[in-house]
Amino acid sequence: MKQNKIIGLCFLFVMVSVLFFSYDMELNAGTANKDDIYSVLKQKIEGIQPEALKVRHHLHEFPEPCFKENETSKYIAQYLRKLGLEVTEGIAGTGVKAVLKGAKPGRTIGVRADMDALPITENTDLEFQSKNNGFMHACGHDVHMTNGLMSARILSEMKDKIHGTIVFIFQPCEEGTPDGSPSGADRMIAEGVLENPKIEAMLGLHVMPDYPVGTVALREGPLMANVASVFISILGKASHGALPHQGVDAIYAASMAVVQFQALISRMKDPNERAVLTIGKMDGGVRLNVIADRVDMEGTVRTFSFEVQDMIRTGIENILKGLQLSLGITYEYRFENSSRYVKNDAKMTQMVLGLFKKILGESNVVITEPMTIGEDFSAYSHKIPSLFFFLGVGTKGKTMEKIHSPGFSPDEKALYYGPLLLTSAAFEMLDAGH
């Protein structure tokens, strides 16, 4: 009996050892396969850099504004069809959706790029400077589109290794409409871009000249701010400038309003909460010796919580009511939410942090503080788990023009790092889901 027990225990030990060894080999093989995939990605992306430059230069030369990206979307759709993807055009007017089905079953993720340009006259002296006078890709959307297209090309060549489906979304009007109507992301979602197939997670990026090329910046949770627009008209009563007591001075009241608005930031808000309130435009008066009967103001509010946003919205109106009582003005007031804050999913952030550090080196992956700029990628991030990161496009040792400036010119080495990080993150997310 003892001998049988000993033999049984030995057999059990051998079986456990074999299973453990097999599991260990499987894990190591999986790691090796991932390393092989990332190595192939690097080689392929290096090989298509001439094409990436050609595509980016074309897109940069022909910028188109919000919801008028007609030629841009045609170019993108044609490029994606040549890759063999299932392409849908005309979503929210000019939006494009392309579906890449992997050879193996798995989850579905999205990769989003924005297409619209800004009404800015370019001043870069580039050989491929904008040919559409008065418009420019001053926010780097030409780089975003190129990164998306190059990612689609590389992944379409590797679909036999893909577990699941990747949906490429090329979105109009990220910059927002002048009249404050819904932006491109909201409209594409309303028209079903996240369905058929149902997208379970979303990836996106934005170029950032504050960081040198070869680096990325991201964080878990809020990354970019709630954005709201403020429209105010102060209505007074005109009179001779030498007899101000006979009128109601709208300029004086507007000046008092702007000063008091800042108390909402410095005295009404928790100092640990980030927020900005800027009045960027004021129009009023007809000539130097007339008391103005009207001033129109426009501004922006940036916050990282809905509670602070609500406090500022209510606070502005309370200040205007106080000026109505004290100075005799009347007012018109609109507070319009443009986009919510961009939030990064915790699991996705931790997943790509390790990956990006492996690809770029730990010192080139920055955990950034939340930025008060806004992005309508937020519409996706409040619908499904999402990951958005800043892609460095600055050149070391060189002073860079900032985004939204006529001289903005990103370092084109970003056309290597953008597709590398997007495709690597896509593989990582799909691999984790199967």
Image (spheres, rainbow, N blue to C red):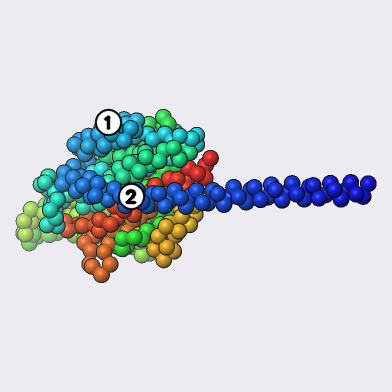
In the picture, measured across the screen, residue 433 lies left or right of residue 182, that is right
The percent position of residue 98, horizontal first and vertical second, equals: 34, 34
Which residue is pictured at 75% across the width and 49% down the height? 14
Q: Secondary structure under badge 1? A: strand
Classed neighbour count for the residue bearing mark 2: other residues with Cα under 10 Å, few (<14), some (14–19), many (≥20):
many
Residue 165, image x and y in percent? 43, 36
Front residue of 417 and 255: 417
Residue at the extreme right of the image, as rendered: 1
Which of the marked residues, 1 or 2, is nearer the chain's N terminus?
A: 2
Please name the residue shown 21% across and 61% down the image.
Answer: 401
Task: Tell me the SS state at disc 2.
Answer: helix
Label 1 environment density (alpha carbons within 10 Å; few <14, some 14–19, many ≥20) = few
Q: Identify which amino acid the numbered label 2 is placed on.
A: Ile
Q: Is residue 136 left or right of residue 149?
A: left
- Residue at image position (45%, 34%) is 103
Which residue occupies 33% across, 41% down?
Answer: 153
| Residue nearest the viewer, comparing 352 with 300 | 352
Tell me the distance, in whole angstroms, between the alpha carbons under discs 1 and 2: 29 Å
Residue on which disc 2 sits? 45
Residue type at mark 1 is Gly
Residue 282 to residue 337: above or below: below
Residue designated by label 1: 90
